[in-house]
Image (spheres, rainbow, N blue to C red):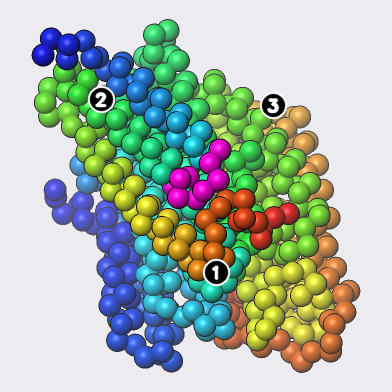
C-alpha cells in the first residue's frame, strides 16, 4: 500500500485536466454525433474527478464533514444522465427525418 | 430546515407542482381540449407570481434573506428577475396557444417544460451557491433543448435542437469544469466564501494560474449562455429552427436568466478577479456588437435577423457591465442592464409575437418576404411591430431608448468615452436592418391580394400587452426606474 501514499491531489487534477482536454478535442474534431455526446460525458467526468479529489483534499483540512465536492459530483452525474437521455432522444428524432448521425450533414440552417 | 425555507422556495415549488399537474391532466384530455393545458400553465404562472409577491411583502424593508442551508438568496435582485421571468412566460404562453394547434403539436409537455425551465431560471437568479446555480442552469437548458426540438416532424426544428444541445452541453461542461476548480480553490461552494478565498489565491503565485484557468473556463460558460460573440454560433440556428413562440421565450427569459447568473457569479463570486475579466469583457462586447450588427445586415429570415439583433443587444448590455464594474460595483451600469432586460423582454417578445402570428395554413411566415404588405392585412399588428422595431433600435421616446440611455450614461460617467461612442454608432447602424423589416411591412406588396390575417384572441392580447408596456415604459419611465432603484437598494432618484 506504500505506493498509494504518493498519489496526491495534484495527480488527480492532472488526470482530470487530461480528460477535459480529450473531451474538448473530441467535441471539436469528431464528426459522429454519438461520439460528440460521449466526449461531452468525458468532460463531465473530468469535472467529477476534480470535485471528488478536491473534496478529499478539503476533508483533510476541514474534517470529514466537508462533503460539498462529493455532493456536487452526485448532482453532476445526475445531470450527465439527464443530458444523455435528452441528447439521444433528440438525435433519434433527427435520425428519423434525416437518416444520418454525421455532424457535417446537420446543415439546413446556415447564414 | 425552518418554515422560511419553504416560503423562499414557494414560487419555484408552485411552478414545479403545476408542471407535474399539467403532465397528469394532459393524459386525461381529449385532443380537442388541449387548450386547457395553456390555462393551467397560465394559472401556475399567476400562482407563482402571487408567491413572489408574498415573499416581497414578508421581506418588507430587509434587503434579502438566505434559505435552504444558505444556498438560496432571495433578495430584491432575485425578486426583480422572478417577476421578469414570469411576465415573459405569461406572454409566451398566450403566444403559443393557437400556434401549437396550427403546427399540430399541441401536447401538454410543452407547457410543463416551459414551467420547469422557469423553475430552473429562478434557481439561477436566486442562487447563492454554485451547486444550485449549476443545477438551475441545467434544468433550464435541458427543458429548452426539448422545446427547441418540439416540432418533431420538422427537419429544421430537429436540427436546431441537435445543434443547441451539442453546443449547450459542451458549454455546460466547460462551465462545470471552471466551477470545480473554483470549489477546489475555495473549499466551499458558497459564492461569498469563493470571493474571500480568491482574494487570497490571487496574491499567491502558486494558486494564481489555477485561479486564472478557473476564471477563463467559467466565463466561457457564462458567455455561451448569453450568446456573446465568439460563443454565439448556436443562437441564430436555435432561434431560426425553434417553434417561433419558443424563439421569443428563449430570446428574453433564457437570456435574462443567463444574465442573472452572470451578474451573480461575476459580482459576488469572481469580484476579486475583476482586473482580469474586465478587459476580456471589453474585447467580447466590441466583438459582439461588430459581428452581430454586420451579420444581421444580410439576413433574409426574420427570426435569424432578430437572433443577430438579440446578440447585438447582449453587446450593449456587456458595455453596461463594464461601466458597472469600472472601479468597484457602480450602480449606474448595473441599473442600465436591469432596465435594458426589462424593456427588451417586452419589445422582443412583441416582435416575435407578430412573427408567430404570421404562421397560418401553409405559410411558415419567418421569411422577410412573408411580411410584405402586412399593413394592409393586419394594420394594428403592423403598427405595433413598427413600435417594437423602433424600440429595439433605441429611438426615443420608446422603451428601448431608456435601456441604452442608462448604459451609455454609466459609460460616460466612468470615463469610457470611446466605448460609449462605439455603442451609439452601432445602435444607429442597427436602425438599417430594423427599418428593412418595416419597409417590407409598409411598402412591400403581398404576392397575392390576401384577405386579413387571422390572429387569435390570446395572440392579440399578448402583442397588445407587449405593445402597451413598450409605450408605457418609453413615455413614463419614472416608475420603472424607481423599481430598478428599489432592486439595487438605491434610495436617491
Q: Which residue is mark 2?
A: A53
Q: CA distance from mark 1 to mark 3?
A: 55 Å
Decide which of B238, B251 is in the foreground and name it: B238
Q: Which residue is mark 3?
A: B415
B205 is within the stretch colored magenta: no
Q: Which residues are magenta?
A: A29-37
Q: CA distance from mark 2 to mark 3?
A: 45 Å
Q: From the viewer's perspective, tell me whether residue B3 is left or right of residue B442.
A: left
Q: Residue at x 16, y 54 (%)?
A: B3
Q: Secondary structure at mark 3?
A: loop
Number of on-image labels: 3
Please tell me if label 1 and label 2 are on a single chain: yes
Q: Residue at x 42, y 20 (%)?
A: B211
Q: Residue at x 43, y 71 (%)?
A: B110
Please tell me if label 1 and label 3 are on a single chain: no
Residue A97 tag number? 1
Give the x, y percent position of residue B423: 74, 40
The image quadrant that residue B335 belongs to is top right
Amino acid at each position: 500500500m506504500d505506493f498509494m501514499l504518493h498519489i496526491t491531489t495534484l495527480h488527480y487534477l492532472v488526470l482530470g485536466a487530461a480528460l477535459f482536454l480529450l473531451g474538448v478535442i473530441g467535441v471539436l474534431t469528431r464528426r459522429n454525433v454519438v461520439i460528440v455526446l460521449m466526449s461531452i460525458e468525458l468532460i463531465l467526468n473530468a469535472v467529477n474527478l476534480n470535485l471528488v479529489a478536491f473534496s478529499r483534499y478539503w476533508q483533510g483540512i476541514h474534517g470529514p464533514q466537508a462533503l460539498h465536492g462529493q455532493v456536487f459530483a452526485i448532482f453532476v452525474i445526475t445531470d450527465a444522465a439527464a443530458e444523455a437521455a435528452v441528447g439521444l432522444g433528440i438525435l433519434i428524432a433527427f435520425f428519423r427525418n434525416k437518416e444520418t448521425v454525421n455532424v457535417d450533414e446537420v446543415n439546413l440552417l446556415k447564414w | 430546515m425552518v418554515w422560511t425555507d419553504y416560503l423562499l422556495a414557494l414560487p419555484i415549488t408552485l411552478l414545479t407542482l403545476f408542471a407535474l399537474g399539467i403532465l397528469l391532466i394532459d393524459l386525461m384530455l381529449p385532443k380537442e381540449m388541449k387548450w386547457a393545458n395553456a390555462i393551467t400553465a397560465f394559472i401556475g404562472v399567476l400562482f407563482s407570481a402571487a408567491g413572489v409577491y408574498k415573499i416581497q411583502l414578508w421581506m418588507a424593508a430587509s434587503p434579502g434573506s438566505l434559505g435552504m442551508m444558505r444556498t438560496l438568496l432571495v433578495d430584491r435582485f432575485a425578486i426583480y428577475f422572478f417577476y421578469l421571468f414570469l411576465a415573459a412566460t405569461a406572454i409566451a404562453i398566450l403566444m403559443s396557444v393557437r400556434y401549437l394547434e396550427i403546427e399540430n403539436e399541441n401536447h401538454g409537455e410543452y407547457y410543463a417544460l416551459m414551467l420547469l425551465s422557469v423553475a430552473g431560471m429562478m434557481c439561477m437568479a436566486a442562487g447563492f451557491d454554485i451547486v444550485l446555480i449549476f443545477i438551475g442552469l441545467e434544468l433550464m437548458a435541458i427543458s429548452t433543448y426539448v422545446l427547441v426540438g418540439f416540432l418533431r416532424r420538422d427537419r429544421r426544428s430537429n436540427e436546431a435542437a441537435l445543434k443547441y444541445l451539442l453546443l449547450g452541453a459542451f458549454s455546460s461542461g466547460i462551465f462545470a469544469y471552471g466551477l470545480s476548480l473554483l470549489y477546489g480553490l475555495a473549499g466551499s461552494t458558497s459564492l461569498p466564501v469563493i470571493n474571500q478565498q480568491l482574494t487570497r489565491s490571487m496574491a499567491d503565485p502558486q494558486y494564481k494560474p489555477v485561479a486564472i484557468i478557473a476564471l477563463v473556463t467559467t466565463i466561457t460558460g457564462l458567455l455561451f449562455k448569453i450568446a456573446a460573440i465568439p460563443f454565439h454560433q448556436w443562437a441564430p440556428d436555435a432561434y431560426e429552427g425553434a417553434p417561433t413562440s419558443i424563439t421569443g421565450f428563449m430570446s428574453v427569459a433564457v437570456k435574462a436568466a443567463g444574465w442573472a447568473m452572470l451578474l451573480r457569479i461575476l459580482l459576488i463570486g469572481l469580484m476579486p478577479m475583476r482586473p482580469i475579466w474586465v478587459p476580456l469583457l471589453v474585447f467580447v462586447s466590441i466583438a459582439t456588437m461588430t459581428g452581430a450588427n454586420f451579420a444581421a445586415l444580410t439576413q433574409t429570415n426574420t427570426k435569424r435577423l432578430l437572433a443577430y439583433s438579440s446578440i447585438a443587444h447582449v453587446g450593449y448590455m456587456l458595455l453596461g457591465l463594464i461601466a458597472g464594474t469600472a472601479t468597484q460595483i457602480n450602480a449606474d451600469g448595473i441599473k442600465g442592464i436591469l432596465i435594458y432586460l426589462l424593456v427588451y423582454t417586452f419589445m422582443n417578445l412583441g416582435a416575435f409575437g407578430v412573427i408567430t402570428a404570421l404562421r397560418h395554413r401553409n405559410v411558415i411566415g419567418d421569411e422577410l418576404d412573408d411580411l410584405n404588405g402586412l399593413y394592409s392585412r393586419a394594420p394594428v399588428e403592423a403598427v405595433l411591430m413598427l413600435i417594437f422595431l423602433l424600440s429595439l433600435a433605441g429611438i426615443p421616446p420608446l422603451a428601448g431608448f431608456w435601456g441604452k440611455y442608462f448604459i451609455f450614461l454609466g459609460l460616460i460617467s466612468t470615463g469610457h468615452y470611446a466605448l460609449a461612442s462605439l455603442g451609439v454608432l452601432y445602435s444607429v447602424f442597427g436602425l438599417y436592418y430594423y427599418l428593412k423589416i418595416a419597409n417590407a411591412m409598409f411598402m412591400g406588396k403581398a404576392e397575392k391580394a390576401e384577405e386579413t390575417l387571422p390572429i387569435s384572441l390570446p395572440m392579440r392580447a399578448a402583442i397588445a400587452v407587449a405593445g402597451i408596456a413598450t409605450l408605457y415604459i418609453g413615455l413614463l419611465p419614472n416608475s420603472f426606474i424607481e423599481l430598478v432603484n428599489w432592486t439595487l437598494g438605491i434610495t436617491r432618484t
